[in-house]
Amino acid sequence: MNDRPAPGLADRLRAIVGERGLVGEDREKAPFETDWRGQYHGRAAAVVKPASTDEVARVVTLLAQERIAMVPRGGNTSLCGASVPDDSGTQVVINLSRMNRVRAVDPDNNTMTVEAGCVLEALQNVADEHGRFFPLSLGAEGSCEIGGNLSTNAGGTGVLRYGNTRELVLGLEVVLPDGRLWSGLRGLRKDNTGYDLKHLFVGAEGTLGIITAAVLKLFPKPRSRATAFVAIADPAAAVALLSKLRESCGERITGYELISRVCVDLVLKHIPAARDPLPARHAWYVLVELSDSAPGDAIGALFEAALGEAAEAGLVADAMIAASEAQRDALWQMREDITEAQKLEGASIKHDVSVPVSRVPELISRATAALEARFPGIRVVAFGHVGDGNIHYNCSKADRQEAAAFFSESPAVNHVVYQVVNDLGGSISAEHGLGVLKRDEIRLYKSALELDLMRAIKRTLDPHGLMNPGKVL
Ligand code: FAD
Ligand code: 2HG
Ligand code: ZN
């Protein structure tokens, strides 16, 4: 790998991507040198914004020939520093945002073929315009891009019903680290012709190649919904309630999110438009959504009856069922604002972990007891996709603690949480990826064989280590 900026590089890149495709001034480069949380800072040799697959392939070929490392970048909403260059000033950021065309929609095949730089929310709208539904949904959907979603195998709030991004993709187009183009844009639901190569690139965090386009699955539009904010006693009640609702409502359960009172208080403190959905305070809540492709009120009646039965069984302390789209939106807004509110509150340490759904209560009780004993005043901010066993077990600093002192404790805090996760058979990275944040820690939790196999795949596709070096492995 080249450790000095290549002379004349900017001119040669400009010759491929044109004036509009090269970010010139240092001032304009700055946003590409840091992450959404402002925790990672690097320096880029150049930032390029190719407008076509051909331009991506030519840029990568040039950089590969010169042995220059590259950092693929989408909407830069990574929560683990995965799309930031290092501080050597030698890496080139390749931003896909100008590649934002929808190439085709095939409603009968229930697919759409889209370029990597399409913003997720724009794709949800395109599906809607064609009478279909694209179910991937996350708080960052207004700015994250589908290439980034694929590369992180993003989860979000629809996984319980529709699966992670991996389950939503049928085909990919990828520029390999040497500049060759793999055209795998097949829209097939059955294709057993050997290794399924697309899955190598999904969740690879840009370390194996640059995704330029994808064929995505579409689904029937939900035409009726019921949404409720339900107060519960504790996380064990959340798990028991989910099992009970599954018996009566089955696959209509689309969203099932755990929210602690600490999270609600943070949102009420930092987000002016937020309102407490229920009159009294409760320690825990779940935000539950049912949806159906059949229109009408049946789903509301089903939900009310199911919640009534759960209340009689002692699983529900109180509930507010959204009576309008506006009320539904406000409930989801409260849920999606937790990340922003915690950012505004100050220094935080994130743990995006998963365990079997049945072990979520134990995860939360054991980790909280261990942390509070060792780090007095630490504030646990736990929430997330309990229906998938994925909890954002985040921590905010004690009220009067300095941020630097809190961050210096990160390794010890992480260790406490990850040991519990490991004991329960869980994962230290459920949906955000490893990036830089968990690159070192993962070595403690994956077997030597797994790491070996990952390194072998990396070496085969990227023998010179040019694609997003320093991330994942
Ligand atoms: P970036 O941040 O730009 O990049 C992420 C990774 O993908 C990097 O490794 C980068 O190199 C690589 N990459 C980007 N584009 C390409 C490409 N075309 N080809 C190859 N590699 C590429 N994540 C969840 O899973 N679930 C959530 O619910 C969720 N909620 C969030 C809420 C907020 C408020 C925020 C800020 C983030 C949230 N995230 C969530 C994390 C983040 O949004 C996702 O990881 C998202 O998928 C990243 O997309 P991006 O376009 O921003 O990618
Ligand atoms: C979410 O589910 C995101 O809201 C972000 O994955 C979680 O802030 C976080 O840690
Ligand atoms: Zn999440």
Image (cartoon, rainbow, N blue to C red):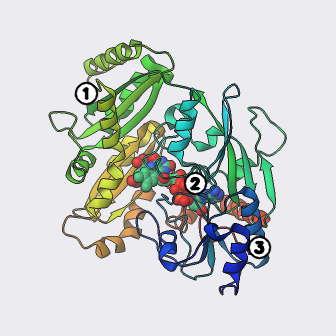
Q: Is residue 467 above or below residue 210?
A: below
Ligand 1 within 8 angstroms of badge 2 C-beta: yes
* Residues at discs 1 and 3 in contact (Cβ within 8 Å): no
Tell me which numbered mark, 1 or 3, is placed earlier along the sequence. 3
Q: In this view, does 157 lie above or below 402?
A: above
Quarter holding the N terminus is: bottom right
User: Please, what is the three-letter code of the amino acid marked with disc 3?
Assistant: Leu
Ligand 2 within 8 angstroms of badge 1 C-beta: no
User: Please, what is the three-letter code of the amino acid marked with disc 2?
Assistant: Gly
Q: Mark 1 points at which residue?
A: 320
* Residues at discs 3 and 2 in contact (Cβ within 8 Å): no
Q: Is residue 176 visible?
A: no
Classify residue 210 by image quadrant: bottom right
Instruction: Give left or right: position of 374 versus 423.
Output: left
User: Please, what is the three-letter code of the amino acid marked with disc 1?
Assistant: Met
Tell me which numbered mark, 3 or 2, is placed earlier along the sequence. 3
- Point out residue 201 in the picture as x, y percentages from the top left corner: 69, 53
- Point out residue 393 in the picture as x, y percentages from the top left corner: 38, 52
